Structures are given as C-alpha cells and as structure tokens.
Amino acid sequence: MDATSRLAAWLNDHPQQMSNVVDYNATTDSLFHFDLTKNNAELSPALVNDTPKFSHWVNKKLADNHCRYGIGGYMELRTIYDSREQFDAIDEPRRLHLGVDIWSDAGTTVYTPLHGKIHSLKDNANFGDYGPTIIIGHDLDGLMLYSLYGHLSRESLTGLSVGMPVKSGQQIATFGSAEVNGNWPPHLHFQLMLDMEGRAGDYFGACKLSEKERYLQNIPDPGLLLNFACAINA
Ligand SMILES: [Zn+2]
C-alpha cells in the first residue's frame, strides 16, 4: 500500500480530527490551479528569475480569476526549477515537486491540520530554499505522519520548541515574504512524510523523476488534508 492509501485509510476513520491548513470556505472561496510544468508557456526564465515580476504574475492570476488561493504541485514535474541551482544534481536534476504549494499573500495564517508535536524547526536560508520551516510529527494510532511547512515568516519560528504539543486547528505560522522565504512569491509549501529518514528541519521538496516510485511510498498526497474543492481551471 502506498503512502497516500495508508493515510487515507486512517483519515477515513477519523474525519473529525482534521482542521483546515488555511482559512478556506468551500462555498465562497475559489481556487486557481497553477501549472508550473513545461506546458505553461507563460513561464519564461525572465519571469521566474525575477521574483517581483513572478509575484506580480501570481497575484494577477489570483485577482483576475477572483481566487483566494492558488494551488498545485503534488508530484508535478517543474521546469521552473531549471534556473534555480538549489535543485541541481550532478547526474539528474530534482524537478519532481513533492508537496503542494498554496499561493496567497505574505502574512496568511497557517493552522495545524492534526494534533501532534513539533518535530523540528529551521531557517533554511539559502536562495531558492524553504526559508523558515516547521515540521510537526503526528502519531495517528501508531501510524507516524510528519507535516512540513516551508517558506514561512521568521516570526513563525518564535515561541515554538521541539517536542511542544500542538492541537488540530491551532495557528502555527504565517506565510513569509520573498525577503525571508527563500526568494519566492509568498506561498506555503505543505508536504507530508511517513518517515523523516533521519532529517530535521528539512526534507527534500523535490526529487529526481527516476525516484518517483520510491517517494510515492513515503509522501502522501497533501490534498487528503486540505479539503480543497477542485480549482477553477484544473
Ligand atoms: Zn513547493
């Protein structure tokens, strides 16, 4: 059974323990699906390498389409990373995106979707990296799940410590601005893992396409916890 099926089985039995990761009302809020693959001809290197321009492009898509959030990215092959050396590897680049990205304004509130404990915290401050990052461990009746929140504000790390318990629905963080979040348009990288593989404060947000099958065994679909309706253009 892959990671998504294992988590889905537990969630199916415990729907009352889940909370939204961001404020979202399925009846009033629309979602815009961002396609960050090579199929999107608008994504020129000149756009994605210029963070203010890239941020303007994101904001205009949301505004023009009357969408509160942009979403997308789970197991998406991203040519957008071609120009971000953080993801380069000597033999094969890591371009398969493992989490989901939720695009909205800096300062947007992030909530814990399930009860748990702070696993680790780190400011991954390299260009193109996660910036301030929180990882929470969730013990789901013996099934261990870890949730990662990347591209946060610096203040998000204040007042938290490893081992601190957190409740489902508790405000845990806010989206960071480009100045602190690894130089990206403001968004949350939300990713789930069954095994942290010894890591702390960080876990790959993208892998090599050739490793997809291995990562599908460890990375459940974050959509299971988001309760998002289908995006308008998905
Ligand atoms: Zn991401």
Image: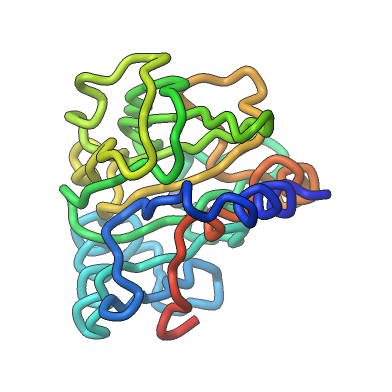
Closer to the camera in the image, 221 or 176: 221
Quarter where residue 133 is shown: top left
Residue sitting at x 36%, y 29% = 166
Nearer-the-camera pick, 82 or 124 = 124
- Describe residue 74's horizontal placement relative to residue 211 as left or right: left
Viewer-side residue, 164 vs 39:
164
Q: Position of residue 16 (x, y in %)?
A: 48, 52
Q: Quadrant of residue 177?
A: top left
Percent x, y for residue 204?
A: 56, 36
Q: Residue at the spot x=58%, y=29% of the render?
A: 139
x and y percentages locating residue 207 in the rendered image:
64, 44
Q: How is the image coloured?
A: rainbow
- Residue found at x 65% / y 45%: 219
Where is residue 124 drawn, in percent x and y?
Answer: 37, 27
Residue farthest to the right, as pictured: 1
From this view, report whether residue 102 is shown above or below residue 2: below
Q: Residue at x 40, y 69 (%)?
A: 44
* Left or right: where 2 falls relative to 206: right
Question: Observer-nearest residue: 198 or 28?
Answer: 28
**The image quarter in which residue 142 lies:** top right
Q: Is residue 137 left or right of residue 144?
A: left
